[in-house]
């Protein structure tokens, strides 16, 4: 019996417009199984979905960098892992020097800071609803001291990030994860910020067995999460290697794939074993 569901957001829970459909909302509420969102997003970008689904379980942001409880419109931090201060400062300066035309931004616990108001940023605002502030060299050191959870590059062409990722890895920085959540987004987080760690933390805190957990995902950064659960369900829109890593493949996020997977797979799990 499944007692906890872990859901990626973009390309999984959310449809092509970045919304949670009414069918998915109704299915999750009717299933009455605790749900944790496990996302690369900042917590402020997750709030609308948490409220729509009326979630009470701990949530995971920044690919596992921040574990928190959302209650009474307040965030209660359960665990936080930021990029090492000297590394985040060094990497941001290197990126600004070497890729000045790229859409570059970073996230603290409470804010999204962008290098410039480029079209990529405008699209991100429309999709997430989060408003950024412009990078100010006078406040950058303060942001570093407070802790940077994620550095992000966006390339809408989907053609540059492989080379940039390779260049960053060649710097041989310590204590960072460098991964693409999709073909347009490259994200750098603390090396301990993995979705698997967020899932493992909640499984331990809730006293769950692995067999009592399930996860839905569509991206490369969901593969570690799949390894931590009893039932891994890949979205129909996921790349081939992600679909192959899942125990099951559901419909796409355009076809209410999460709702379908809960109804047709998880709620009938005893019949499938």
Image (cartoon, rainbow, N blue to C red):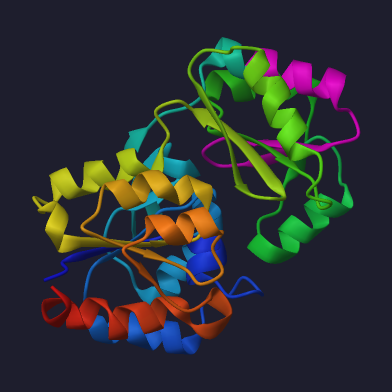
Residue 243 coordinates in the image, percent (x, y): 46, 62
Q: Residue at x 84, y 51 (%)?
A: 157
Task: Please indicate, yes or no, whether residue 141 appears anywhere in the rendered image.
Answer: no
Q: Residue at x 16, y 66 (%)?
A: 3
Quadrant showing the N terminus = bottom left
Q: Is residue 180 above or below residue 35?
A: above
Q: Is residue 142 above or below residue 38?
A: above
Residue span colored magenta: 89-113
Q: Quadrant of residue 211?
A: bottom left
Residue 204 coordinates in the image, percent (x, y): 15, 44
Q: Is residue 86 above or below residue 114?
A: above
Q: Is residue 165 above or below residue 123?
A: above
Quadrant showing the C terminus = bottom left
Residue 90 lies in magenta, yes or no? Answer: yes
Q: Residue at x 43, y 82 (%)?
A: 24
Q: Is residue 31 left or right of residue 36?
A: left
Q: Residue at x 51, y 72 (%)?
A: 236
Q: Is residue 118 left or right of residue 262?
A: right
Q: Is residue 107 left or right of residue 216?
A: right
Residue 104 coordinates in the image, percent (x, y): 77, 36
Residue 217 lies in magenta, yes or no? Answer: no
């Amino acid at each position: 019996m499944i007692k906890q569901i872990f859901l990626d957001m973009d390309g999984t829970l959310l449809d092509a417009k970045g919304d949670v459909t009414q069918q998915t909302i109704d299915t999750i509420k009717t299933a009455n199984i605790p749900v944790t969102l496990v996302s690369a997003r900042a917590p402020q970008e997750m709030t609308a979905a948490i409220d729509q689904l009326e979630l009470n379980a701990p949530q995971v942001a920044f690919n596992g960098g921040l574990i928190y409880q959302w209650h009474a419109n307040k965030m209660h931090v359960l665990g936080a892992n930021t990029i090492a201060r000297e590394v985040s400062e060094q990497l941001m300066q290197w990126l600004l020097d070497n890729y000045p035309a790229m859409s570059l931004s970073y996230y603290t616990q409470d804010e999204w800071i962008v290098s410039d108001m480029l079209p990529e940023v405008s699209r991100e605002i429309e999709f997430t609803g989060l408003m950024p502030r412009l990078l100010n060299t006078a406040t950058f050191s303060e942001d570093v001291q407070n802790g940077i959870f994620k550095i992000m590059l966006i390339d809408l062409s989907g053609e540059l990030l492989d080379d940039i990722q390779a260049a960053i890895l060649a710097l041989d920085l310590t204590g960072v994860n460098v991964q693409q959540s999709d073909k347009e987004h490259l994200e750098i987080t603390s090396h301990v910020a993995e979705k698997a760690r967020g899932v493992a933390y909640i499984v331990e805190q809730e006293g769950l067995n692995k067999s009592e957990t399930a996860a839905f995902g569509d991206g490369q950064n969901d593969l570690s999460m799949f390894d931590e659960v009893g039932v891994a369900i890949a979205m129909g829109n996921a790349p081939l290697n992600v679909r192959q890593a899942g125990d099951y493949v559901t419909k796409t996020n355009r076809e209410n794939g999460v709702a379908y997977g809960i109804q047709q797979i998880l709620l009938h799990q005893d019949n499938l074993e």
